[in-house]
Image (cartoon, rainbow, N blue to C red):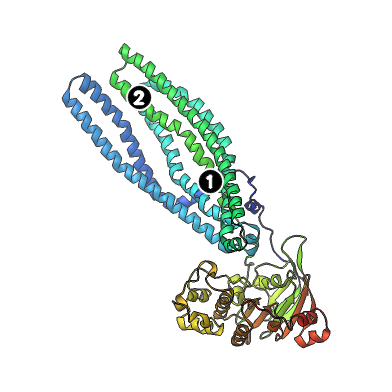
Amino acid sequence: MQQTSTLSPAPTRLRSLRVTGDEPIGSWRSVLRLLHYLRPHWRAIVVCYAAWLVTILLDSAIPLFVRQAIDGGIIGRDEGVLGSAVALTVGAYLLKSIFDYVYFSLYHYYEVVAARDIRSDIYATLQRLSFGFFDRVETGQLISRATSDVEAAQHFFGHGISTVVTVIGTFVVVLSVAATVSLELTLLSLVAVPPIAAVAWFFAREIRPVYTRAQQQHGVLTSVLQENLAGIRVVKVFGREADQIARFVRSAVSLFDRQMEVARLVAVRMPLMVLLSGAAGVIVLWYGGSLAIAGTITVGTLVAFNYYLARLMMPIRRIGWIVNIIARATASSDRILEVLNAVPEIQDRPGAVDLVDPKGEVRFEHVSFGFGPGAPVLRDIDLVARPGEVVALVGATGSGKSALLGLIPRFYDVTAGRVTIDGVDVRDIRLECLRSIVAVVPQDAFLFSQSIADNIAFGKPETPEHGVHLVAELAQVDRFVSVLPDGYRTRVGDRGLSLSGGQRQRTTIARAALVEPRILILDDATSSVDVETEARIRSGLAAVMRGRTTFVVAHRMSTVMRADQILVLEEGRIVERGSHEELIELGGLYARTFSSQLASDNPVA
């Protein structure tokens, strides 16, 4: 029975990850959603700002002690009053330094731990996302989100929030205390607040989209760097170092231009706010000086108020800096949430089950598939692979062989029809169970930068050493490991590039064999080994393949001719099927391909 896939389209939001620099501007909603990472640390936050409140109260008391020292001690010529005022000032500074230590320690703690949790969640989300996501999204953009964007959010959680709280709190507390010293001067000092607030408001509107473009270009630069490092051998082989340097420089210059947009805005707006706050200070000094000359206020009061004025102007001047850090945080928060909100296209259906004692019968029933709308890769595929059978797929590059095999472990979902294992639609099997019974040896023999033993045991890390050695012998890994200085503990370097192509492929075959799958997929897995080694591997794998369904993709006919069933694909359709002998007798595409290779099998060493 034909069945339509339940595949849901990727969320529209993900399209911005392809990055053009014109992504939607970050919003406060994004920032607020990230703030829940601070919730588990609310106790530390409460203690942090309680400590800050003590420091600001002590800071506000110091000018009163200074006024007492000037008016009662210096002008009043009373050394006792001067001594007690100095002692109180020293004590206030000592206590303030202690509570400052608590405050700074705690806000640095919770900003760092929140950033750690965001990075962990980004990484966990990426592990859950489907192959289709990584087909569409540049790796550099993902790296940028997990590094520079998280750093921007971390800066906001710590410096940003603490500055907002302290600016507002300082303004309220100091203004209240200053009003008790001189209400007239306090009201005069507030003249500068409306114009500074207006400049800050327009600054915020201008800086936010500029920051967004700068962050996006940072992702582009990271993509260029990541791609170059991954393909550095190709670059050197073709002598394209100069071109790659020029490409990187172009991206770096573009990032520089966008960062300079930010710098120019900051350079204009920040000094303007400082100028306005400075003007307020000059006015207060002139008017307050006149009051002191007239005897309306004391000199100590004027000195104390100037201390308060400096404290009042400090948070006002920092409005521009706050706008700056918030703008970067909103842009980065939106980019972070693009990843965290990404929905895996391949998920367990409600009521998905585990296969009990799977046999490994695989059926394709009228299966069609495409990576995108209007681009079919497979058309109306029907096949049955019974337990113990070896099914070989043959066809030109792009005929759909790898796409067909990717549907079995649900790397992708069908767009029409269904794939079943033991009669159960693979979409109704829990992913964890499904992928525990299917092992894939890909054409791209990727290894982690760990030891050979760790790479072999990747699927079953609890495997004892002798178990690793057993499958290594099966896949002919022991033949090259024996000459390595550290044996199975030899680290293979980035992507395993310290090994030859054939050595990497043998290691990945051993890795697949170790998990003892019910279904084994060999996607051109012996293309990088010589004929003699391939024969040894094939004989070794015979024991593993016995009683298990095995799919083999190969361009070398010596690999597929022993299969129980051979499927010939052309433009996404099965055009021939049968055993080697049957297809030779048919005299079609398979027979012609076999004849052309018969005397010219040139394997990669």
Say which quadrant the N terminus sits in: bottom right
Q: Secondary structure at mark 1?
A: helix
Residue 306 numbered mark, or none: 2
The label nearer to you, 2 versus 1, is: 2
Which x, y percent locates residue 507?
55, 77
Amino acid of disc 2 = Asn
Which of 241/374 is in front? Answer: 241
Which x, y percent locates residue 457?
50, 76
Say which quadrant the C terminus sits in: bottom right
**Image: 561 above or below 287:** below
Q: Residue at x 75, y 86 (%)?
A: 580
Give the side of residue 403 with respect to residue 119, left or right: right
Give the Cα distance between marks 2 and 1: 37 Å
Which x, y percent locates residue 99?
31, 42
Residue 31 numbered mark, or none: 1
Q: Secondary structure at mark 2?
A: helix
The part of the image, by quadrant, that contains residue 447 is bottom right
